[in-house]
Image (cartoon, rainbow, N blue to C red):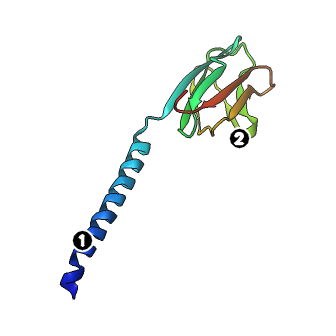
Amino acid sequence: MFASRLPTLALGAALALTLLGNLACERTAAASKPQQRVEIKVSKDGYTPAEVRAEAGRPLTLVFTRVDANNCGEKVVFPERDIKKTLPVGEAVEVSLTPKANERIVFTCGMGMYKGAVVAVSSGS
């Protein structure tokens, strides 16, 4: 009786291994996507670049560097994300986030005079 079910069990096991293998490959592919990283200069002219296009669903690190003290860029604020960071002159400060599909994430200086945004785009854009 067990011998007659052997082909069915073998087929079921092969199917399960195939499905598990595909799932593992998908996870590896997603995990192996490089993180997005964008350097942003903060000066008397504001943020450069002021708009960052980033792939939705992928981690993004923004690296803010304030180039001098003669500007109001002492802080960067992401109001919708409740993120506030102090930007010491000459030091790189990282802000990590993952934009969602069709999301626009605004960031400003502490006084709201300098404005910028992360614009999420689909991977095909």
Within 10 angstroms of label 1, few (less than 14), some, or many (20 or more) residues? few
Q: Residue furthest bottom?
A: 1
Quarter occupied by the N terminus: bottom left
Taking 43 as reference, is 117 above or below it? below
Give the residue displayed 21% in from the left and 82% down from the top: 4
Quarter occupied by the C terminus: top right
Residue 107 x/y as whole percent: 71, 29
Residue 93 x/y as whole percent: 58, 29
Which residue is tagged 2?
Answer: 81
Q: Residue furthest left?
A: 3
Question: Can residue 28 be seen by looking at this rendering?
Answer: yes
* Viewer-closest of 123 and 73: 123
Q: Secondary structure at mark 1?
A: helix
| Label 1 to label 2: alpha-carbon separation | 51 Å
**Image-quadrant location for residue 61:** top right
* Viewer-closest of 81 and 74: 81
Q: Earlier in the sequence, mark 1 or mark 2?
A: 1
Residue type for callout 2: Arg
Residue 117 x/y as whole percent: 69, 26
Circle number at residue 93: none
Q: Would residue 15 appear left or right of 31 to someone viewing this image?
A: left
**Image-quadrant location for residue 39:** top right
Residue type for callout 1: Ala
- Which of pointers 1 and 2 indicates the residue nearer the eye? 1
Residue 94 x/y as whole percent: 57, 32
Give the residue displayed 24% in from the left and 80% down from the top: 5
**Image-quadrant location for residue 104:** top right
Give the residue displayed 39% in from the left and 43% down from the top: 29
Circle number at residue 10: 1
